[in-house]
Every structure is written in structure tokens, then in C-alpha cells.
Amino acid sequence: RQLWAYAVDQNFLDEICQMEQLELLHLDKVTATDLSSRRKLSKLTSLTVINASKVQDLAWVPQHAGLQAIAIGELKAIHDLTPLSTLTHLRALGVEGGVWTPMQVATLAPLAALSNLESLFITNLQVTDKSLQPLHALANLRVLQCAQFFARDALDSHAAPRPELRCDWFDEASWRPE
């Protein structure tokens, strides 16, 4: 029911996707280019794909309602989050760059539709429009983890109406030099 796989080429991924009872799948160092075979995994509740530099888009992301959490990281060719906008059932989402290289996207606007989202991790994600405004629509969001890529006033305007939302950058002490 749970699998962590490393160095996942196309053949390995296709074999993994024959395990239709998988509920949790963690893929790291993915050299496969076509992740669409994971559509067979209709029982997944959690999916992580890390270090998949050959993946060109997010069209492969599972759409079934049982999926509760997705984490993608170090997908350097991905710059558009639009395919995530249909995942309204998600409770946790991570879209992150690597340790040394940020992931870059144009906007967080596609995430505004994720009405059930409770936790969002966008550490080392640079957003071209530098706006957190799309996240204002996420009434259930309780945890926001991000890097200091957003202006102080953008974070303050997001924090003010949301006292239940936790984010390290909402604390003024986080912005003061030691």
C-alpha cells in the first residue's frame, strides 16, 4: 500500500503503476518523462514526485477525489500550476524548488480553486507576479510555509484577516536581523 522508489525510469514507473492498491507513493530522482501511467493508481491518497527534471507539465497529476496530498519538488521544467486548479479535494499541497535552485511559476492563481486546502508548502518557489492574493480565497488554509520571496506587505495583508493561519513570515521577529 506504500512505496518509496528512487531512480525511477520509465520502465520502473510503468511497473509501479501496476500496483493498483497503492495508497502512498513517493518517487525520487525520476527520469521517466511520461507520468500518465500513474492514472491507474486510483487508490492513491498521497503522491510525492521529487527531482523529475524531464517532466514538462502537470497534466499527469491524479484527478480522483481520494487524493488528499500532493508534493512536487525540483520539477525544473514546470512553470504553470494550472493543472492543479481542478484538485479541489486536496487538503495538502507542496510545490517546491530544490535546495539550491528555486522552482519558478508565473502565478499562484490556479491554487485559488483549492477550497479544501489546509496546508500549503511553497518553500523555494518563486512567483513571477509576487502575489499571494490568490491564496486569500482559501478559507480552510491553516498552514503556509514559504520562503522570503514575497514582500512584507503582501504577507501582512494575507495575515491580517486570518489569525488562524500559521506562517513563519507573519511574525515580525522573522524579518529583523539578529
Image (cartoon, helix red, strand yellow):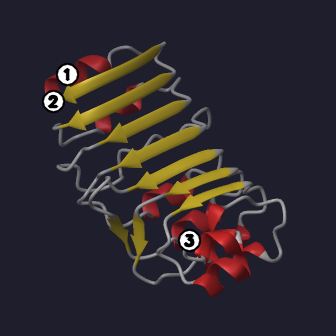
Q: Quadrant of the image for the C terminus?
A: bottom right
Which residue does the image show at 38% across and 70% down from the upper left? 105
Judged from the image, the secondary structure of the residue bearing numbered disc 3 is: loop
Judged from the image, the secondary structure of the residue bearing numbered disc 1 is: helix
Which residue does the image show at 72% across and 82% down from the upper left? 157
Foreground of the two, 113 or 128: 128
Residue 108 drawn at (x, y percent): 51, 71
Taking the view exactly as shown, the residue that stands out farthest to the bottom is: 153
Judged from the image, the secondary structure of the residue bearing numbered disc 2 is: loop
> What is the CA distance from the residue labelled 2 to the residue labelled 1?
5 Å
Foreground of the two, 39 or 131: 131
Q: Which mark is residue 178?
A: 3
Decide: is 175 above or below 1. below
Residue 48 drawn at (x, y percent): 42, 37
> What is the CA distance from the residue labelled 2 to the residue labelled 3?
45 Å
Nearer to us: label 2 or label 3: 3
* Kind of residue indicated by mark 2: Asp
Q: Earlier in the sequence, mark 2 or mark 3?
A: 2
Q: Earlier in the sequence, mark 3 or mark 1?
A: 1
Answer left or right for 29 relative to 25.
Answer: left
Q: Which residue is mark 1?
A: 12
Residue 138 drawn at (x, y percent): 71, 63
Which residue does the image show at 70% across and 80% down from the upper left? 156
* Kind of residue indicated by mark 3: Glu
Within-10-Å neighbours for mark 2: few <14, some 14–19, many 20+:
some
* Kind of residue indicated by mark 1: Phe
Residue 172 drawn at (x, y percent): 70, 75
Q: Which mark is residue 9?
A: 2
Nearer to us: label 3 or label 1: 3
Within-10-Å neighbours for mark 3: few <14, some 14–19, many 20+:
few
